[in-house]
Amino acid sequence: MTKPKIYLIDVTNRDGVQTSRICLSKLQKTMLNIFLNEMGVFQSEFGFPLTRHETNYLNANLELVKNGALAPIRMGGWLRATKDDVKNALKLVPRLKHVNLSISTSDQMIIHKFKGKLDHQSVIKEMIEAVKEAKRLGVESIGVNAEDASRTNMDYLIEFAQAAKKAGAERIRYCDTLGCDTPFSIYERIKLLAEALNLPIEVHCHNDLGLVVANSIAGAKAANDSGCDAYINTCVNGMGERAGNADLVSVILAIKYGNDMKNYFFDDRINLKIAWKICKYASYAFGVPIPINQPGVGSNAFAHESGIHADGALKDRRNYELYDYEELGRGEPEIIDTGRKITAGEYSGIKGFRNVYDKLEIVFKDDAEATKVLELVRYANVHNQKPLVDEELKFVAKYPDIARKIFTMTP
Ligand SMILES: [Zn+2]
């Protein structure tokens, strides 16, 4: 028997963007998918296949999957677990191969959200129909989400999950939707669930009690201890509804460096070197600064001032640093132009635009190609409403036709 592993499914482009008061453009979501792929994340929950303004973005990103730009990462869509939603979503996004189908399972939500429309047995029935419809339409992997799993009666949760497995689900997502679990309660509950089910478990936690990373690790450990793979849901910089989801970098650090985590096997594709780049980018894209004390990437994460600590860290970094900043892609000087700077924006002309791309060492075949990309860069600026970063400029030049689809929205 192979040892069970821990994988990551990042949900920044789903839970992250459904957070109040913040949002990402479709180009920014695409860039995050690209960076998540570089980081070795198993799957990106890349959006809502039934939401019309996502359609072009989702289809364009599935083209990037097809041409190898987004590989080996999987792109997964989030849907309500109803047959109609699955059917309509696959009409809009026909190449969708990975989905998570979500339905509430707690008494609280079945009684007070569905208000008589669904009871415990019809919740299971709806979910089964949705899973079967997804299979029928060629979806390759299906995760079934038990929303509010942490407040769900344990016997019912197991019954629900077993029905999902029988219908063809490959994973069950245990959602601590309100963030009420503790590491102790989630360990116990996922242990019971995984032992009864013998199926990979996704651990989806929220930070309402400040326990999100601890709960995610404890949940994954329980799944592995029961012989099942675990998939932790993360968000870059801990974005996500209310107090947020599990921070991507903190989860990786906790698995790699936490006491007692040595015996657990982590997806070996994970490349922490991308941490600095993805966190800085997400902070810029969301317009939300990284707190100075954020694990790994905060500006104080490797800063020492007090006499004893500074002296100790200088003598041997291991005196006061658990891991190395280089490992997170930090430590390189970042060059900021302080003299003349030509930027490419909504109203750029061809001369300035070519200067920007010359600096990125991108050469255009001829004037026609340069003009075509310039036009798209103007649209990209309108779309993002902030100056483009180098990676975005490179993306538009490399995949102009896909970029055009990403910017296209027809209400
Ligand atoms: Zn959530």
Image (spheres, helix red, strand yellow):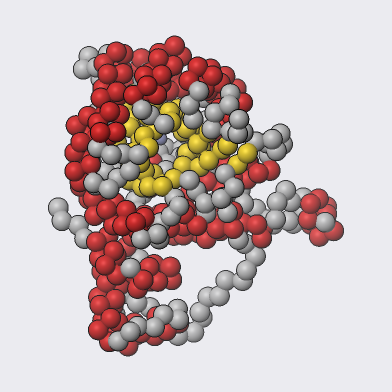
Name the quadrant of the N terminus.
Answer: top right
Q: In this view, does 289 lie above or below 373?
A: above
Which residue sits at x=22%, y=14%? Answer: 116
Q: Where is residue 366 in the image (x, y as percent from the top left)?
A: 30, 86
Task: Return the x and y of residue 398 as percentages of the image width and height.
Answer: 36, 71
Q: Which residue lies furthest to the left in this view?
A: 411
Q: Residue at x 54, y 32 (%)?
A: 229
User: Relative to the observer, which residue lies in front, 52 or 314?
Assistant: 52
Residue at x 24% of width, y 37% of height:
137
Residue 295 at x, y percent in the picture = 61, 48
Residue visible at 30% across and 82% down in the picture:
370
Q: In this view, does 378 lie above or below 200?
A: below
Direction from residue 213 to residue 160 in the image, left or right: left
Say above or below: 221 vs 36.
above
Is residue 267 in view?
A: yes
Foreground of the two, 176 or 255: 255
Residue placed most toward the observer, 83 or 341 = 83
The image shows residue 245 at horizontal and vertical percentages of 47, 39
Image quadrant in which you'd find residue 315:
bottom right
Left or right side of 23 for 5: right
Determine whether, in the image, residue 305 is placed left or right of residue 120: right
Image region (quadrant) for ligand 1: top left
